[in-house]
Image: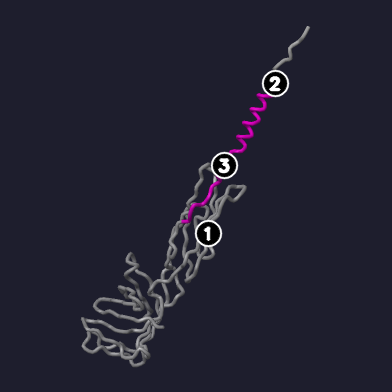
Amino acid sequence: MKFKRSSVPILLFSFLTIISCEQASDNNITQELPKILAINVPDTVELPKTIFLTCDVENEDRYDIQYKWEASSGTLSNTDSSVLTFYTPKVKSEVIITCSISDSLETFDQKSIAIDIILPEFVGSFYLESVNSCDTTYFTDNDDQYELLLDIYEGLISQWSFAYSWRISYYGFSFPDSCIDWLNRETHMGIIGKSGQDKDKKVWMAHPQNQGYITQIFNWSKVGDRLILTSGNITYTFKERD
């Protein structure tokens, strides 16, 4: 009597092979790791200023990611968030800011950018070129003597102000046919800063006198190498020193 061989082992082997191939195929599926697309921030920032930077991330597979921010100078807050608060340093400089993303085991990506911290245009060393008062313009006589010098220094003395010095030469000077009769010899130190909501148009200048401070608000503009300060009906035009 002849017995037929069972086909069961062959079918079982084929079934296991199919399962094994499917598992191998599943194991070959690669997940997309999160990556940083960009850090959104201006290329240049005028100090002193607070700015917000955003780390844009592509995270298709919805990893639980953590943020970390670092900077070569300045002050940071919210360093574990996708949006960073950055307070500029107090000096003109280049700042490198880095955003990193990770989970508890590995760092997925990081990106760095450079930001130029620049000074307000009114910072510098200037001499008085002319004064306009009551529609009369008076030009100073001698550039070499610098009858009135205005120096506004680079370093911040507080979050919003710079030091300045105002020096009128020994003899002072007069303004014929003008609303101003005379500027006497004077030297004082004070502080200057951008004013209120019109920071691009107004500055305040304050200096000590007796027991208090004298504070004056000027409209200001910078045209080429000339700094123009206007208060009431008087306009001072300063030229930047070489």
Vertical comparison of 29 with 227: above or below = above
The numbered dot on residue 112 is 1
Per the rendered image, the range of residues in magenta is 10-39
Instruction: Tell me residue 37's x, y (percent).
Output: 49, 52
Instruction: Tell me residue 143's x, y (percent).
Output: 35, 88
The residue wearing badge 3 is 31
Q: Which residue corresponds to the image point at 61% horizontal and 34% vertical from the top-left?
A: 25
Q: Amino acid at mark 2?
A: Ile
Mark-to-mark CA distance, 1 and 3 = 25 Å
Instruction: Tell me residue 191's x, y (percent).
Output: 40, 76
Mark-to-mark CA distance, 3 and 2 = 36 Å
- Which quadrant: the N terminus? top right
Q: Which residue corresponds to the image point at 32% horizontal and 70% vertical from the top-left?
A: 202
Instruction: From the viewer's perspective, tell me whether residue 74 is left or right of residue 230.
Output: right
Nearer the N terminus, badge 1 or badge 2?
A: 2
Q: Amino acid at mark 3?
A: Gln
Outermost right residue: 1
The numbered dot on residue 237 is none
Looking at the image, what colour scheme do you see? one colour
Q: Quadrant of residue 14?
A: top right
Q: Amino acid at mark 1?
A: Ser
Task: Please report contact status of discs 1 and 2: CB closer than 8 Å, yes or no.
Answer: no
| Residue 18 part of the magenta segment | yes
Task: Please report contact status of discs 1 and 3: CB closer than 8 Å, yes or no.
Answer: no
The residue wearing badge 2 is 10
Outermost bottom residue: 171
